[in-house]
Image (cartoon, coloured by chain):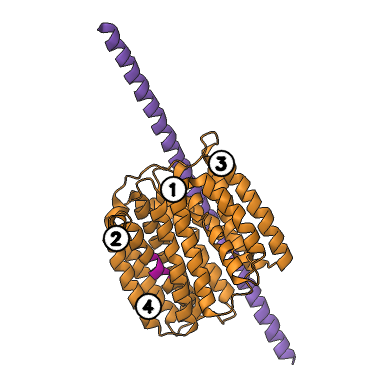
Amino acid sequence: MVEYALLDAGMGGLVVILGGVAIVVFVILAAIILRFSIRAIKRELKKETEAEQLDTQVAKEEDIKAEQTDEEV
Amino acid sequence: MKKFRDNKTGIEYFIVHACVETICFYLLRLHYPLLLAGTIAFTYDFFAFLPQGIIGKFIESHKKLPYETIGNLLMLGAIFLVASPVHALHITGYVVLGIGNAIMHECGAIATVTESRGKIFQSALFVSGGGVGIVIGQTMGIAQAPWQWLIIPAVLSEVCALAARKSVRKGTYPTFDVVEKKFSPWTILLVAFLVTAVRSYLGYAIPISWNKELWQTILLFGIMGLGKALGGYFVDRIGAWKTAVFSTLAAIPFLIFGDKIMVVSVIGVFFFSMTMSITFAMCLSILKSSPGLAFGVTTAALFIGLVPAFFVRFGLLTNAILIVILSIACCVLLSKTLKK
């Protein structure tokens, strides 16, 4: 009886330890994945903003050029 | 014929998605009676849903690798690992299965957006294929069909994915514009994330005690798939705002009072599934040059929404209250952030 009780306690302890390790591994992996994902999103948004700024700048330059051409004419 | 040609990539990835889910749900059901079923499902979901964003980003920036074949080979490897008599290999098999699934999903998302011409229907069509695969896979798994049969969907998936391989690698994507400009990109992404996570959780909270027979399960998943595909169709036809508000509100009474009445419940599930493509379109409107990453945001949200279902189960009344409150909250968030 005592041996069985000890075995049960031992198995239970093993399950708790392995479960705990698994949870820690999942949390660390999730943190790494989320960090990389957020970094990728940040980079993507930065790229979008830069592209928009460039578009606006090009449009402005074209407007100025058109105005200059009109004045010359 | 023209409509078929216009949606060719969507149809190809509909088949790929169905094949992929057939393999996954067969393997998930194969060891279902075990004590470890919850752990297996959690492990698989973790690797299938969470890393899709970074996988998608990687695919977009390294176009030369044969991702479709890698994804299918991983799934094929997973079949052998999970079906092997060595128990220690099973969990590894589910990890490999999840990663293979994630790669195939990302290929589908990128390919269908590339060929979308600014419409969301093809992506919705691709997503709806999953329901077909879930039913086939679960049925085969429960019936303990020989695992060797899974070679058929694996080969079919490879053939269809290779047919659409150019679409994954084009690198130019049409523009989506379904969100209000006055909100910051992070706000829109957060709303899309929250709405998807809530929808994912509610998927488990919907009371469906009528679902007891196999044909009823087939009907339920069929309606779910139809709802997802038609959700995309309506977004293109009447706009994202109208589709989101109508489908979210219309679903509530049917979901609550459909616990024992199949027809009522099925109508609710149909409306409920229609919002699927809207959150993807929202992410696409922000992450314009990265459909893989945009799709990854929604799948990560799906996983986060699933997590509570592994640990807590509420009663019928609590679920009904949750459905009403969360659905209205989602409706408000979507109506504010989507363009009218």
Provide the residue span drawn in magenta.
Answer: B16-21
Q: Earlier in the sequence, mark 2 or mark 1?
A: 2
Number of other residues with Cα within 10 Å of mark 2, as a class: few under 14, some 14 to 19, many 20 or more: few
Gap in Å between the C-alphas at discs 2 and 1?
35 Å
- Decide: marks 2, 3 in contact (CB < 8 A)? no
Name the mark on residue B337.
3
Identity of the amino acid at label 3? Thr
Q: Badge 4 sits on which subunit?
A: B
Which residue is denoted by mark 2 in the rendering?
B66
Left or right: A31 in relation to B96: right
Position in image of residue B257 (x %, y %): 67, 65
Vertical position of residue A38 compared to residue B18: above or below: above
Q: Quadrant of residue A54?
A: top left
Magenta stretch: dominant secondary structure: helix
Which residue is denoted by mark 1 in the rendering?
B237
* Colour in which chain A is drawn: purple
Gap in Å between the C-alphas at discs 2 and 4?
21 Å
* Residues indicated by labels 4 and 3 sit on the same polypeptide chain: yes
